[in-house]
Image (cartoon, helix red, strand yellow):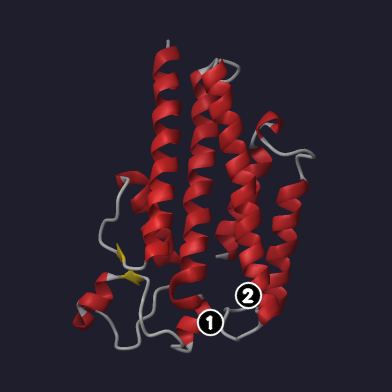
Amino acid sequence: MAAVIALIIGAQLAEPQRLTLHPHWLLPALEGAFLVALLVLNPARINRESAPLRATSLGLAAIASVANAWSLSLLIHGLITGSEGRTAGPLLFEGAAIWGTNVVVFALWYWEFDRGGPVARAHAHQPNPDFLFPQMQTPEIASRDWEPTFFDYLYVSYTNATAFSPTDTMPLSRWAKLLMLVQSAISLVTVALVVARAVNILR
């Protein structure tokens, strides 16, 4: 999870300043501070119950969401008004960075909320899952104590963003369905607008 967050910070710093909140470094710096705090509180794995740790994790996801939503809204506004998308190459790079960040951001939310978060899952506080993974439907294909890791939620987020619908993992709770609905809608709008504009200006 820490490595993926570091990639998000790098992608945000690489984005044009016109598509970010000012000052350009503010939100990436806040995300970096939250990430360092998480690593200090739990350097190996998030496996102990702590209100500050939980608040830090949720704060990191919220900041990343705000930063990416702002960049996406500015890009869409620029495409609609004609101030963005004059050349295909930079436009595709900007769209891919925002789309990829969106995948990671929603993976964070899935990871944080499924059955109360990573610590609650580890301690089996909530028996009813919000996401039904294949290993839960067919227990003989996995170990008895199998639990989803961050990568599993990243995969769920990626497939939802590319297929615009669930694939092998089904949302069960209303909040999980709502988040997947919002993510697929954002992904569809981003891909449709960016690709349509890029194809239109390719020479």
Looking at the image, which residue sits at the far top?
Answer: 203
In percent of width and height, residue 168 lies at 25, 61
Residue type beneath disc 1: Val
**124 relative to 202, above or below:** below
| Quadrant location of the C terminus in the rendered image | top left
Question: Is any part of residue 119 visible from this angle?
Answer: yes
Residue sitting nearer the eye, 44 or 130: 130
**Which residue: 64% across, 43% down?**
12
23 left or right of 19 in image:
right
| Quadrant location of the N terminus in the rendered image | bottom right
**193 relative to 32, above or below:** above
Residue type beneath disc 2: Arg
In percent of width and height, residue 177 lies at 36, 59
Question: Is any part of residue 202 visible from this angle?
Answer: no
Tell me, for residue 54, which label it has, or none: 2
Label tally: 2
**Which residue: 60% across, 64% down?**
2
Tag 1: Cα neighbours inside 10 Å, few (<14), some, or many (≥20)?
some
Tell me, for residue 166, which label it has, or none: none
136 left or right of 71 in image:
left
